[in-house]
Image (cartoon, rainbow, N blue to C red):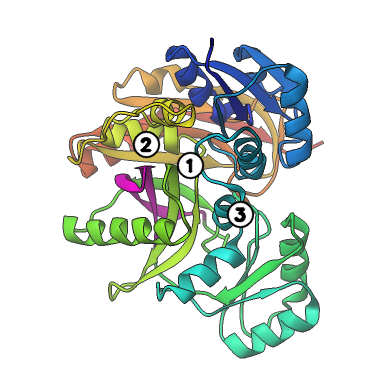
Amino acid sequence: MANWLVAVGAGRWQMSGIRAAQAERIRVLAIDGSKDAPGLAAADRSAVADIADPEAVLKATLESGIRPAGAISFISDAGMMAAAALRETFGLCGPDPDVSLHLTNKCRQRRAWTDAGLPCPQWRCVTEEAQANAAVAEIGGVVIFKPADAAGSRGVTVVEPGEAWQPALSAALAASRSCAAIVESFIAGVEYTIETFSHRGRASVLAVSEKKKVDGTRGTVANELATSALPDSDVDQIGELAVQALAVLGHRDGAGHTEILRQPDGNLWLVEAAGRGGGFMVADGIVPKASGYDLARACAMQAVGGEPPEPSRTRRRAFVLRFLPTRPGVVVAMSGFDRAAALGNVECAPLIAVGDRVGRAMIDSARLAYILSWADDRQSALALADRAVSCLHVEIAPCP
């Protein structure tokens, strides 16, 4: 009898998980809200349903006639609650709905971390203007508004003292599925993302990336993730906090993607965490290049009750993942990707197509292309990324 895995989400960044499952002879039912999602064609079976709607995903699974051995949302936060509902319905292994809610809702995360004594900014959860007004006054200084349950920098706004905060609240609530927002103190520092894999409560840190941000976004949109120049002891401390943060949320199995701020004095502050792999070439680009670990394969095996391989505890290679942010206009030409890839130790691809209209880079998905480079040391990886970028040409003309 075939092992069936329901992949909730079948977009570009879910493809590595679907293919990894099939390589392990696991059959895949892929579900996505878009009939054009590439994973639908790649999977053994497919269905179109809103992945943010657990009932719709459960109905599509029941109508398929299969009995799943596992359910997973490889990369997407939007599909995590539906995957959890499938696991609960069919008695499958993996995070239950309560844990999954902690992993997708920032209000719940902040409460759990604060109760556990982990480092958090001052914060308040709000659903209306009166609450937001009180939160801004109580916290004071520069604050940041963000949706309680959205990803990719959607609805995130930094508000200076005296600046009108109402538009920021509206943007955050509009991007939130639960119509709730977090208001918290803005902490200046360098942001790090930590990629982990946990199995039966044992967590391994696979990669720690230092972020650079797009100018003009007030530090909310990233355009580069790279191996840090920090000493190993400091990197280990960042990784340990990420592992603690996920454990407090009840995360015992699967990929983890955690964001942490580090101030110049070394103080660490939790930003947010997710119980899935990072998108935009983080889970399927940075992780295997940095650690040598096939995260997609491990997650697929684990989801159907298998025993994933043990990650190595040895750091391997330095890496740089760089994005070309969008700028307003229409994409009229792209070239140089083959020449960049021919440099060796470089992967790159466009994230848009000729004819696309693009705007200012105000969310993470506003990217023209990615470049991933890797080498034995950080400086070599950065130099290689610079050479790759110099090969690329993306022409954008003003909108007619």
Q: Quadrant of residue 2?
A: top right
Please tell me whether mark 1 sits on a helix, a strand or a loop.
loop
Number of residues whose C-alpha sits closer than 10 Å to that of mark 3, classed few (under 14), some (14–19) or many (20 or more): some
Label 3 or label 1, whichever comes before in sequence order:
3
Label 3: which residue? 101
Give how far apart the Cα atoms at labels 2 and 1 are.
Answer: 9 Å
Q: Position of residue 355 (x, y in %)?
A: 72, 26
Q: Is residue 187 visible?
A: no
Residue 286 has which mark?
Answer: 2
Name the kind of residue labelled 2 in the image: Ile
Q: Which residue is mark 1?
A: 278
The span from disc 3 to disc 1 (Cα, nearest Å) is: 18 Å
Amino acid identity at mark 1:
Gly
Mark closest to the chain's N terminus, 2 or 3: 3
Above or below — where is 65 with respect to 163?
above
Q: Main secondary structure of the magenta part?
A: strand
**Residue 45 visible to the viewer:** yes
Give the residue drawn at x 79%, y 34%: 56
How crowded pointer 2 is (Cα within 10 Å; few <14, some 14-19, many 20+) is rated as: many
* Amino acid type assigned to the residue bearing label 3 in the image: Leu
Which sits in the foreground, 102 or 262?
102
